[in-house]
Image: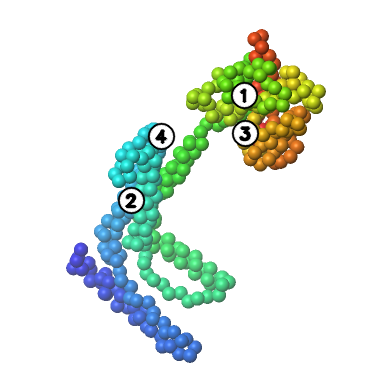
Amino acid sequence: MSSQDIPEENLPAAQSAGHDQHGHDAVSVADDKHPFADPGLPPHEHRVQDVDERAAKRSERSVALMFTTSMLATVGFIASFVAIPVDKSVYIWPLGHISALNFALGMTLGIALFCIGAGAVHWARTLMSDVEVADERHPIEATPEVREKVFADFKQGAKESALGRRKLIRNTMLGALTLVPLSGVVLLRDLGPLPGTKLRHTLWSKGKLLVNMNTNEPLRPSDVAVGSLTFAKPEGLEEHDHSFQNEIAKAALMIVRIQPEDIKDKRELEWSHEGIVAYSKICTHVGCPISLYEQQTHHVLCPCHQSTFDLSDGARVIFGPAGHALPQLRIGVNDEGYLEALGDFDEPVGPAFWERG
């Protein structure tokens, strides 16, 4: 647009003619009291949007377009999260084969955030007031006059932002800012379903055989020697199962044979078979697997943080940061002479959790 299309009184040269009257171009002279000269403010140059409403409308539409693009990108983020499979990959040059879901989420969320920022910057640079105002320094304490001036400046700034008059910008900006947080809300779905009672139960149940972790064969009482440490898993749980790691993390069992007269805890003796006791292998501190056994003292040690449990006395904690004893599994022998579980653990295995009673 040429200057011929703008009324003469609205031209920047005509509007800046009065700057000298307000002292904007005046340069003070340095003296002993003020060793540095004040260069003043340069003449204010009006933007085309300040003098032409058509240009202002174009800027308004540009800002609204960016906010609208942000809204569409946020919707695309949510749609991608729901529709694209986690294991799907695509070829993107020059990145190569990458996760389609990660690429879609990154692109849509990046566009949504960028358009909000770009729209706000373009709004401020083209439509909000850009007049520089010199303000003398004042004491830190706020006088009534200063507070009154701050409120007046705020009202003036709010008025100059034209937020109330430019409804298209206002509405699209509010829409973009409202939709963007939904991206974070949708991500909460990845936390998965609530655990329910999964932390309280394992695969152990009445009649489940104790299977040796090394030989993958059911255990007989004769297979467990006095002073030995054997690791077992529930019958039917195989390493190639999809849920093996999750299930063995709760059901892993260690079996020790102690002379019955050396067992101090009455319930431990009742839940054992001929001195064979079965305890959870999962440490009650942070869930590390216990693997160190001292046969003379019947102590087991967690290698992570040195929590020590006495297997001859209900697996109570005798040293270290663990908070409670190891859960015991009640065992017996079936008609075929194999060791079997007589139920599940009587309490949740592993570390304590906040819902635990």
State how far apart marks 4 and 1 are (Cα): 34 Å
The quadrant of the rendering that contains the N terminus is bottom left
Would residue 121 be seen by someone viewing this image from the given angle? yes
Q: Amino acid at mark 2?
A: Met
State how far apart marks 1 and 3 are (Cα): 13 Å
Q: Position of residue 253 (x, y in %)?
A: 64, 26
Secondary structure beneath label 4: loop
State how far apart marks 2 and 4 are (Cα): 30 Å
Residue nearest the viewer, comparing 11 with 225 = 225
Q: Position of residue 348 (x, y in %)?
A: 65, 29
Check disc 3 and report the residue beneath it. Answer: 289
Q: Amino acid at mark 4?
A: Val
Q: Circles 1 and 3: CB distance less than 8 Å?
A: no
Check disc 2 and report the residue beneath it. Answer: 66
Q: Amino acid at mark 1?
A: Ala
Q: Circles 1 and 2: CB distance less than 8 Å?
A: no
State how far apart marks 1 and 2 are (Cα): 61 Å
Q: Position of residue 73 (x, y in %)?
A: 36, 44
Image position of 221 with respect to 100: above or below: above
State how far apart marks 4 and 3 are (Cα): 31 Å
Check disc 4 and report the residue beneath it. Answer: 86
Q: Residues within 10 Å of mark 1 (few under 14, many from 20)?
A: many
Q: Circles 4 and 1: CB distance less than 8 Å?
A: no
Nearer-N-terminus badge (2/3): 2
